[in-house]
Amino acid sequence: MTVQFIHDGDAIDYTPSADVAAGDVVVQEDLIGVAKLDIPADTLGALHVTGVFDFPKAIGSGTAIAAGLEVNWDAVNKEAYPRLGGSASDKLLGKSVAAAGDNDATVRVRLVQ
């Protein structure tokens, strides 16, 4: 059998075991997706795995993220942070496409898979 094209892959099918709200970040091993719409439990929905999104980040001194840095996702605290540190269990989210200062509550990230 040869490879068969399915779709562009901007979004993937996802059936959650619990309700997922629009904007929730879903981590499946090393694959991170964002729910664009609410997905009720046990119902087929979609996760976006490409695109640019504003993710929450910590605020305060030393929390700035420069444009172009790799960014991780902290699933426990539900925050993005520079890949330079953090827990080994956190996953690569993508690259920041705009600088976020210490007082910014979000950072703009392009998802990478």
Image (cartoon, rainbow, N blue to C red):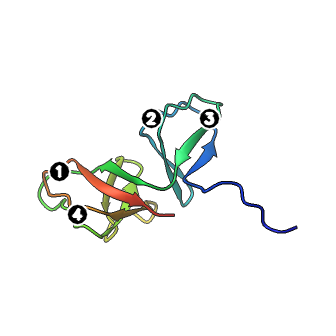
49, 103: nearer the viewer: 49
Q: CA distance from mark 1 to mark 4?
A: 10 Å
Q: Residue furthest right?
A: 1
In the visual, does 35 lie left or right of 97?
right
Q: Earlier in the sequence, mark 3 or mark 2?
A: 3
Q: Quadrant of residue 86?
A: bottom left
Q: Amino acid at mark 2?
A: Ala
Q: CA distance from mark 1 to mark 3?
A: 33 Å
The residue under label 4 is: 65
Asked which secondary structure carries label 1, the reply is loop
Q: Residue at x 54, y 45 (%)?
A: 47
64, 96: nearer the viewer: 96
Q: CA distance from mark 3 to mark 2?
A: 15 Å
Q: CA distance from mark 3 to mark 4?
A: 34 Å
Q: Nearer the viewer, mark 3 or mark 2?
A: 2
Q: Earlier in the sequence, mark 2 or mark 1?
A: 2
Q: Quadrant of residue 95?
A: bottom left
Whether residue 5 is situated above or below residue 59 in the rendered picture: below
Question: Residue 28's spot in the image, x, y percent?
Answer: 57, 52
Q: Earlier in the sequence, mark 1 or mark 3?
A: 3
In the visual, does 28 lie left or right of 60?
right
Q: CA distance from mark 2 to mark 1?
A: 22 Å
Asked which secondary structure carries label 3, the reply is loop
Q: Amino acid at mark 1?
A: Asp
Asked which secondary structure carries label 4, the reply is loop
Q: Amino acid at mark 3?
A: Ser
The residue under label 2 is: 22
Q: Which mark is residue 7?
A: none
Q: Amino acid at mark 4?
A: Ile
Q: Mark 3 packing: few (<14 Cα in 10 Å), some, or many (20+)?
A: few
The residue under label 3 is: 17
Q: Which mark is residue 104?
A: 1
